């Protein structure tokens, strides 16, 4: 059912992404900038509107950003246009799926900030992505898989099926405003993914309102599953953090950040 689901962020979600307080408050930028600085160059899969990519380039690190969504990349280009030339020159943007890409260069670090890999539903797509990453990593290069830690009690809790506001009425610079709700439409326990729906309510200056929905399957992972997936793809787990403060993964960690190192030459 979800074998090759590829989810593309489109209007108005791409346009509002950088105005969503929940995303603006995400405490991951310093973590990714530090990792990028230590590596010297980075490839970000699912770079979106450049929320992490632009601060990385501004910190002096060359970065390639890959994304499937033209709307998200367009936002990123717009934001880059306002950056000094030396920052723009450090950035390469590519429209492609993370399941199949060929950039013709290697990197010491590949990242997947804000759960981009969780858009890959099938094991085939996950392995295809990891093989592409493997080909693009320099010897000893590292991959950071950024996921939430699965809370089994929440995966199936009907409370999450209730439409709840995750973004209160928020003003946009052009006079419009929007609010957003989220809900789980369906729990697919056997497929290990949930069908997520965001609804955006836009209010125009004259009072006219619109409602748009974005629905997509989102895969959830377990720590030992990730370890096996990586081992199948020529990686070794170095460490698993439970948060951007680098605390180790624990029962209560909300995040699951797996740092893996390329090992053998895998095809
Ligand atoms: C939650 S956003 C994260 C964006 C950015 N990394 C950040 O931290 O703000 C996930 C991104 O993954 C992209 N994406 C989803 N499936 C993809 C695929 N198969 N290949 C490349 N990008 C994909 C989406 O278009 C979106 O921009």
Image (cartoon, rainbow, N blue to C red):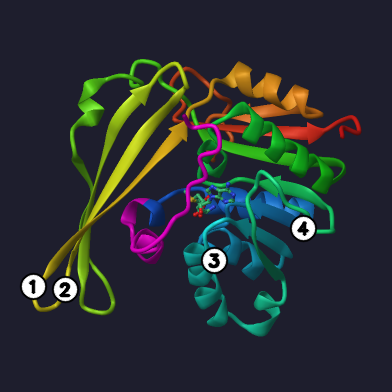
Left of 65 or right of it: where is 134? right
Q: What residue would you read off at disc 2?
A: 204
Closer to us: mark 2 or mark 4? 2
Q: Is residue 86 above or below residue 53?
A: below
Tell me if label 3 and label 2 are in contact, CB under 8 Å: no
Tell me if label 4 and label 3 are in contact, CB under 8 Å: no
Tell me if label 1 and label 2 are in contact, CB under 8 Å: yes
* Depth check, front residue: 57 or 155: 155
Residue 229 x, y percent position in the rendering: 68, 24
Residue under the image location 18 percent in, 32 percent down: 162
135 is within the stretch colored magenta: no
Question: Callout 1 environment at 10 Å: few (<14), some (14 to 19), or many (20+)?
Answer: few
Q: Which mark is residue 207?
A: 1
Callout 3: helix, strand or loop?
Answer: helix
Residue 127 x, y percent position in the rendering: 69, 32
Residue 123 x, y percent position in the rendering: 62, 27
Q: Earlier in the sequence, mark 2 or mark 4?
A: 4
Tell me if label 2 and label 4 are in contact, CB under 8 Å: no
Left of 131 or right of it: where is 188? left
Q: Which mark is residue 41?
A: 4
Between the C-alphas of marks 4 and 3, the distance is 20 Å
Between the C-alphas of marks 3 and 2, the distance is 25 Å
Closer to us: mark 4 or mark 1? 1
Q: Earlier in the sequence, mark 3 or mark 1?
A: 3
Residues shaded magenta: 1-22
């Amino acid at each position: 059912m979800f074998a090759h689901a590829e989810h593309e962020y489109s209007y108005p979600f791409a346009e509002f992404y950088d105005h969503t307080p929940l995303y603006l408050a995400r405490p991951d930028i310093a973590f990714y900038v530090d990792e990028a600085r230590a590596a010297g160059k980075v490839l970000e899969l699912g770079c979106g509107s450049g929320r992490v990519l632009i601060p990385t380039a501004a910190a002096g690190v060359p970065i390639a950003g890959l994304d499937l969504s033209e709307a998200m990349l367009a936002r990123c280009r717009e934001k880059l246009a306002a950056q000094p030339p030396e920052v723009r020159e450090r950035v390469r943007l590519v429209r492609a799926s993370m399941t199949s890409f060929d950039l013709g260069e290697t990197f010491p670090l590949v990242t997947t900030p804000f759960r981009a890999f969780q858009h890959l539903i099938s094991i085939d797509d996950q392995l295809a992505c990891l093989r592409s990453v493997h080909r693009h990593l320099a010897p000893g290069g590292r991959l950071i898989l950024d996921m939430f830690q699965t809370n089994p009690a929440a995966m199936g809790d009907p409370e999450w099926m209730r439409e709840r506001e995750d973004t209160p009425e928020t003003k946009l610079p052009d006079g419009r405003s929007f609010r957003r709700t989220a809900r789980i439409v369906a729990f697919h326990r056997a497929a290990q993914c949930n069908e997520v729906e965001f609804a955006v309510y836009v209010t125009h200056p004259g009072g006219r309102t619109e409602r748009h929905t974005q629905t997509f399957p989102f895969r959830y992972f377990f720590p030992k599953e990730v370890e096996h997936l990586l081992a199948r793809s020529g990686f070794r787990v170095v460490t698993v953090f439970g948060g951007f403060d680098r605390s180790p993964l624990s029962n209560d960690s909300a995040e699951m950040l797996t740092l893996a190192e390329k090992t053998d030459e895998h095809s």
